[in-house]
Image (tube, rainbow, N blue to C red):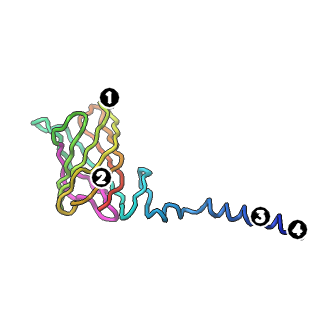
Amino acid sequence: MVKVKTPFTVLLMVSLLGIAACSDDDDADAGGTTTETGTTGKEGGEPILIKTHLPPLNARGEQVGEVRSGSTIGDSAFCAGGKFADAPGEPPVVVRTFRCPGGTLTITFSPKPDQALKQSSDWEVVKGLRSFEGLSGGGRMRALFESNGDEGRETFAGTVTR
């Protein structure tokens, strides 16, 4: 009987290990979800995706633009019809404030100066007012500019908590 129990026990252990390896309960137990950036939101964290259009600098040399449709926070639209403006900061830090119907959200990011038509950087929430008050988090941004470098599109993806 010993010969029957040993193969059965080995087969049972291999099966259980295979099931455990395929499980995605680790992330669920941590209370998180994986976002586009590969980060895990915990304890009420929700994914955020901000898409922007960057027009050429205005007459005063300021960067202002608009939030594009498809921007989301959690399952809701983010900043529909909103605008943004960059405040002067210590280069290479960009301080950007999104002005939305429900409040304002300020983030910072630092694209590398040697990146011309394609840029990327980590970004972080620094302040939220009204509906964004108490928001924290961040993620990764990517920008793609036209061949002349004056106009482009950005995508900020990450996780935020309230």
Looking at the picture, which amino acid does disc 2 mark? Ile
* Label whose residue precedes the other's in the sequence (2 or 4): 4
Looking at the picture, which amino acid does disc 1 mark? Asp
Magenta stretch: includes residue 3 = no
* Label 4 crowd (10 A; few <14 / some 14-19 / many >=20): few
Between label 4 and label 3, give the one nearer the viewer. 4
Looking at the picture, which amino acid does disc 4 mark? Val
Which numbered circle lies on residue 5? none
Give the CA distance from mark 3 to mark 1: 57 Å
* Label whose residue precedes the other's in the sequence (3 or 2): 3
Between label 3 and label 2, give the one nearer the viewer. 3
Looking at the picture, which amino acid does disc 3 mark? Leu
Residue at numbered disc 2: 50
* Label whose residue precedes the other's in the sequence (2 or 1): 2
Which numbered circle lies on residue 2? 4
Residue at numbered disc 1: 114
Tell me where the magenta segment starts and ends, as one range: 67-86
Rendered view: 114 above or below 101: above
Classify mark 3: helix, strand or loop.
helix
Residue 103: image x %, image y %?
17, 59
Residue drawn at (83%, 68%) of the image: 5
Residue drawn at (49%, 61%) of the image: 27
Residue drawn at (32%, 57%) of the image: 160
Classify mark 4: helix, strand or loop.
helix
Of 21 and 54, nearer the camera is: 21
Q: How many marks?
A: 4
* Label whose residue precedes the other's in the sequence (3 or 1): 3
